[in-house]
Image (cartoon, rainbow, N blue to C red):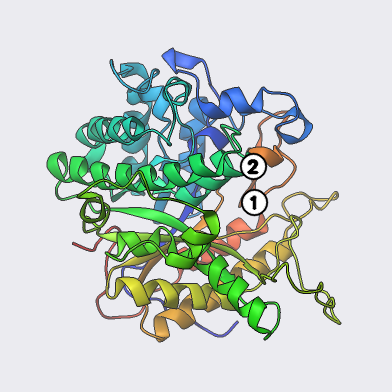
Amino acid sequence: MPRQEFPAGFVWGAATAAYQVEGGIQADGRGESIWDRFAHAPGRVRNGDTGDVACDHYHRYREDVALVAELGLDAYRFSVSWPRVLPNGTGAVNRAGLGFYDRLVDELLGKAIAPHLTLYHWDLPQALEDRGGWPARSTAEAFAAYADIVARCLGDRLASIATLNEPWCSAHLGYGTGLHAPGRTDPAAAGAAAHHLLVGHGLAMQAIRAVAPRTPAGIVLNFEALEPASDRLLDLEASTIANEQMNSWFLDPIAGRDYPVAGGRSWSWRQNEILPGDPGLIATPIDFLGVNYYTRRRPQSPLLPAAEPPAQSPECTAMGWEVHPEGLTDVLLFVRSRTGDLPLYVTENGAAYELDPADPTRDPDRVSYLARHVAAAHRAIELGVPLRGYFVWSLLDNFEWHEGYGYRFGLVHVDFETLERRVRGSGRYWASLAAAPRASGTAGAAGAGR
């Protein structure tokens, strides 16, 4: 790799999510989440795996923070478990649950690690799902109250707050295909959920501004590099629709645009949930936008014969995701086309590979994957993208949603029998990036943007 200097203040970090690492699902008054219910339903998760224990981060957070410090990373991105703070989704605060995040933030600050908090990474309180879930507007209103509680307690010590992580997954995998919790398969519910997630984002932004006005706040969206399977007209149309549904659906309304027309028509969403004032609420100004990127997809029209397979099979991860670093550059440029000079962060990027049976800490494929994507991010900066930081997914091997523990993304190997942590080669590589000098000059510091 050629030498690449990143801007002064550029943030190198690692990310996790509450249900994927915490465990302790019944500890200290935590309520039930939709993922608790979903994972315990037969046939929902590979091998019947659950997040009951996961990495036991709830009891081992000091050890994990020490790992972040050992790697010399600038920042740690984590999410709060809504049912740990509000077991019923609304009502009385569980002080013991909120206290865990209070201690976690203090532990990070004590090691000079910037805390980047996400309010919602898919673990909706089951009590709210029982009352309608995200297809009901009342969930968006409950989310704003939850945001107020967390921001009031922790906001003044955080480098940033993200309202939602990948609302596309929450809406369409949770309510459309049923692949994720709560496992519903209702396209109309998915459309309503997508809109109310954005309403919840806007209401939460207002709540955060009211109690933590100096804390940068924004949202995290997932993107794919989308290219048509061929240059035939129907494949071009299929790619356009896929781009609107995946990449534009949440980004455009946040940027003050309307919902994409072709994508909405393809989903048959009637937009009955939109109330007067919703577009302005959703477009409440944000301080940063997080970009999650993993792979490329090549949509093909179902009206055309199946495309001929490529002469050479593309490089793929263990999950079958194509390795396409150039797509990260393209996605960052696409986001900038909507957001201008707004600071951007790569908030998730990473890959799962098969374990080396002789040494599970040896992962040269992951090192190669990350190095090429870092080069793609650097190229985006050269092209004028205001990229301020990069969080790898994930700090730890963890519970990978409906795939259970079958795929490992961690910079740190976790033995799920003993819960022993061991830093991988990719962890050492990521540490070398954090240790490298940044270019002279000024750039946004961690969480900057307002």
Q: Residue at x 25, y 55 (%)?
A: 279
Residue 61: x, y in percent?
47, 33
Q: Quadrant of residue 334?
A: bottom left
The residue pinned by badge 1 equals 409
Q: Amino acid at mark 1?
A: Phe
Q: Quadrant of the N terminus?
A: bottom right
- The residue carrying pointer 1 sits among few (fewer than 14), some (14 to 19) or many (20 or more) residues within 10 Å by Cα, namely many
Q: Quadrant of the C terminus?
A: bottom left
Q: Residue at x 85, y 49 (%)?
A: 357
Of the numbered discs 2 and 1, the one sitting upstream in the chain is 2
Describe residue 431's horizontal placement relative to residue 283 as left or right.
right
Q: Is residue 53 visible in this depiction of the protein?
A: no
The residue pinned by badge 2 equals 400
Task: In this rendered view, identify the residue nearer to me: 121 or 358.
Answer: 121
Residue 286: x, y in percent?
25, 58
Task: In this rendered view, identify the residue nearer to me: 113 or 302.
Answer: 302
Describe residue 54's horizontal placement relative to residue 143 as left or right.
right
Q: Residue at x 72, y 67 (%)?
A: 302
Residue 159: x, y in percent?
28, 51
Q: Determine whether 97 is above or below 121 in the image.
A: above
Q: Determine whether 311 is above or below 262 in the image.
A: below
